[in-house]
């Protein structure tokens, strides 16, 4: 814990603290405006951290991440539109509370629940990451390769409506990472004679395209870019947290925060799943489940504790294995790599100051967001009124600047534009973008470890099944495929039976 | 056309194309450890999965209708391409001013003289501001 407190003290400098405050404010702004997300905020700001020290840059990005996730509740409660996808379940009870004239109470409860969830996630991160790193240090390339395969199958089975589409998206992401020079022996692949393709597609332009630009393209395709929300700040009502009620909800807080943290640990699942799962569990465990959805604080607590708890969980796998827990941690991974830091179990031994810096930054960000959002909520509600015609062109310019700053080549700008359009098309076809991006990140890890494993094992595949860790993860991967296909088969059969039933009823009526 | 048929068909056609392109990858190691193995196995899996998806969709007659692309998206795509092209010709400040002015004017759909002046001023201020912050404070090279 000494290292944690030393790292925490290191954040209270004139160089880092104001940046973290700025990060929280910008994150809250991005989180509260529908159409702008925490992931977009981190991706856009990432290029600005090039010149910063690693801990300073990471603290800034983590503050943005926490602010972005926490800001989503404002529009979810006031407009019934989640500011970020992770606030989707906040709409279920938050907006009915607004309709009952309890918007202030809903906002205060949501902010408080976010603080509790964030702190639980932070504690799990602090206590789980070091022993997990110690265990993971013994992993061989066989194990890493198997973990990568497991991550893709879990992602495909949980993150998408259709398993085939999910796994196709993950493989497409992995395939996109194979363009250019191969990671082990430097062989050129799919360059088609273009010199600029030698280095392949860089990480940041792909992320900016897929997460920032494709969202904007979607707004244009749906013709929603002229929609404008109008929120009156005076209509918030009483703005307080009922501490007596909160104390009675400790079980809901703990369960939802832990669900969020656990979902965060699973690669690529994201906050929307965490908040929906926590909401349905809170409803199941409640003495009055029929009141859920009518505007009660319990549902709001479940959703907000879970999505903020997810942040700590998502950082666990990033720090210990180098596998991002969600799309925003995927960008944080890029941020670490930009600073020549390779996340993984060795990082805890080689650069403990960075790891404890991240722990401390998450802790401080949770406190800062609570203070800033709680005291400035009336200001953040005004942000909802900013028209999109002022925001979107500036975001596109920032995307271009960010993509170019990566390597100072225009090819990265074209890559960003191309992947932006590809991301939009994929969304239209029902493909999951997080699956694609995590596949893109896991691709080089799986390939490099696979080739190393082949070298260590003299070209034999047998160690994959004889080594306990790799065998365990491969069995888990097969099981996740099996259960996903079985679930889909059952759903298809149920849908067919319902169709048949409807046809019979219609025939009877006739 | 059926959305899922189009989606799986595109993936299938693309995978077959790249599978042929993968023939050109130089093989320096034994086949299982070569740099050609990983993309080839991925493409093989993509061909198999998309063919399965296509077969299942056609057999079940499932999948939603293909969605029409609205003209605002095409306008925005055109503006983005024009902006990137103009960066080469006119430099960052002029290209960005022109882009922000045109895009925000189109999005606001208010073509009054007052709004045109406002958007032009806004475009220049933002372009100049970004240019100043990135070059003088963050020490970046801008396109």
Image (spheres, rainbow, N blue to C red):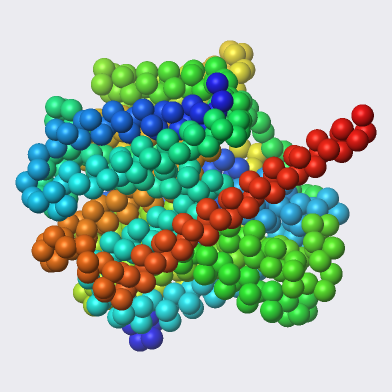
Seen at 29% across and 51% down, the residue is A443
Quadrant showing the C terminus of chain A? top right
The picture quadrant where one finds residue A475 is bottom left
Instruction: Identify the residue at the far bottom of this view.
Output: A2
In this rendering, would B132 be left or right of A384? Answer: left
Q: Does residue A4 sit above or below A303 in this rendering?
A: below
Q: Number of callouts in the render? A: 0
Seen at 82% across and 74% down, the residue is A287
Whether residue B76 is visible, yes or no, is: yes
Seen at 26% across and 67% down, the residue is A464
The picture quadrant where one finds residue A104 is bottom right
The picture quadrant where one finds residue A302 is bottom right
Percent across and percent down for residue B103 are: 49, 22
Instruction: Identify the residue at the far right of this view.
Output: A509
Closest to the observer, A51 or A13: A51
In this rendering, would A144 be left or right of A478? Answer: left
In this rendering, would A416 be left or right of A36? Answer: left
Percent across and percent down for residue A380 are: 62, 50
Whether residue A11 is visible, yes or no, is: no
Q: Does residue B140 sit above or below A292 in this rendering?
A: above
Q: Does residue A89 sit above or below B111 in this rendering?
A: below
Closest to the observer, A210 or B41: B41
Closest to the observer, A40 or A101: A40
Quadrant showing the N terminus of chain A? bottom left
Percent across and percent down for residue A327 are: 44, 53
Percent across and percent down for residue A447 are: 23, 53
Closest to the observer, A123 or A286: A286
Seen at 51% across and 22% down, the residue is B73
């Amino acid at each position: 814990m000494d290292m944690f407190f030393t790292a925490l003290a290191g954040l209270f400098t004139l160089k880092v603290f104001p940046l973290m405050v700025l990060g929280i404010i910008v994150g809250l702004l991005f989180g509260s405006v529908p159409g702008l997300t925490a992931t977009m905020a981190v991706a856009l700001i990432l290029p600005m951290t090039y010149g910063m020290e690693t801990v300073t840059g990471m603290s800034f990005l983590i503050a943005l991440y926490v602010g972005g996730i926490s800001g989503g509740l404002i529009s979810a409660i006031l407009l019934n539109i989640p500011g970020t996808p992770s606030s989707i379940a906040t709409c279920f009870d938050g907006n009915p509370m607004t309709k009952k004239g309890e918007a202030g109470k809903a906002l205060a409860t949501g902010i408080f629940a976010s603080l509790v969830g964030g702190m639980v996630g932070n504690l799990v991160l602090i206590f789980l990451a070091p022993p997990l790193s110690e265990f993971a240090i013994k992993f061989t390339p066989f194990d890493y390769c198997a973990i990568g395969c497991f991550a893709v199958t879990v992602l495909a089975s949980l993150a998408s409506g259709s398993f085939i589409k999910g796994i196709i998206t993950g493989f497409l992401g992995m395939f996109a990472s194979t363009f250019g020079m191969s990671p082990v022996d430097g062989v050129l692949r799919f360059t088609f004679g273009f010199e600029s393709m030698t280095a392949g597609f860089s990480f940041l332009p792909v992320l900016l395209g897929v997460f920032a630009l494709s969202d904007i393209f979607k707004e244009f395709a749906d013709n929603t870019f002229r929609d404008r929300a109008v929120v009156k700040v005076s209509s918030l009502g009483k703005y307080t947290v009922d501490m007596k009620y909160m104390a009675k909800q400790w079980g809901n807080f703990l369960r939802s925060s832990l669900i969020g943290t656990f979902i965060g640990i699973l690669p690529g699942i994201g906050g929307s799943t965490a908040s929906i799962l926590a909401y349905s569990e809170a409803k199941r465990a409640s003495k009055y489940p029929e009141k859920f959805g009518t505007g009660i604080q319990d549902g709001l607590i479940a959703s907000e504790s879970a999505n903020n708890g997810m942040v700590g969980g998502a950082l666990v796998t990033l720090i210990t294995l180098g596998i991002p827990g969600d799309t925003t941690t995927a960008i944080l991974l890029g941020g670490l790599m930009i600073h020549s830091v390779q996340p993984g179990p060795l990082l805890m031994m080689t650069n403990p100051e960075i790891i404890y810096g991240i722990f401390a930054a998450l802790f401080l960000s949770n406190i800062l967001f609570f203070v800033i959002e709680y005291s400035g909520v009336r200001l953040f509600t005004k942000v909802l009124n900013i028209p999109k015609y002022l925001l979107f062109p500036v975001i596109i310019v920032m995307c271009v600047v960010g993509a170019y700053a990566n390597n100072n080549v225009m090819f990265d700008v074209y890559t960003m534009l191309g992947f932006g359009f590809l991301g939009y098309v994929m969304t239209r076809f029902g493909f999951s973008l997080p699956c694609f991006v995590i596949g893109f990140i896991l691709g080089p890890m799986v390939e490099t470890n696979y080739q190393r494993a082949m070298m260590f094992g003299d070209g034999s595949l047998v160690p994959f099944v004889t080594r306990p860790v790799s065998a365990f993860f491969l069995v888990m991967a097969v099981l996740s495929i099996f259960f996903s296909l079985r679930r889909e088969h059952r759903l298809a059969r149920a849908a067919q039976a319902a169709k048949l039933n409807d046809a019979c009823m219609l025939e009877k009526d006739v | 056309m059926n959305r899922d048929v189009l989606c799986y068909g595109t993936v299938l056609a693309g995978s077959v194309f790249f599978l042929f392109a993968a023939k050109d990858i130089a093989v320096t190691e034994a086949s299982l450890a070569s740099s050609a193995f990983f993309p080839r196995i991925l493409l093989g899996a993509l061909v198999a999965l998309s063919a399965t998806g296509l077969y299942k969709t056609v057999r079940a007659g499932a999948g939603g209708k293909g969605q029409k692309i609205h003209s605002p998206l095409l306008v925005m795509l055109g503006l983005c391409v024009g902006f990137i092209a103009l960066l080469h010709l006119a430099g960052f400040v002029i290209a960005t001013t022109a882009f922000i002015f045109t895009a925000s004017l189109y999005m606001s759909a208010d073509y009054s003289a007052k709004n045109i002046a406002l958007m032009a001023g806004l475009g220049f201020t933002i372009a100049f501001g970004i240019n100043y912050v990135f070059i003088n404070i963050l020490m970046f090279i801008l396109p």
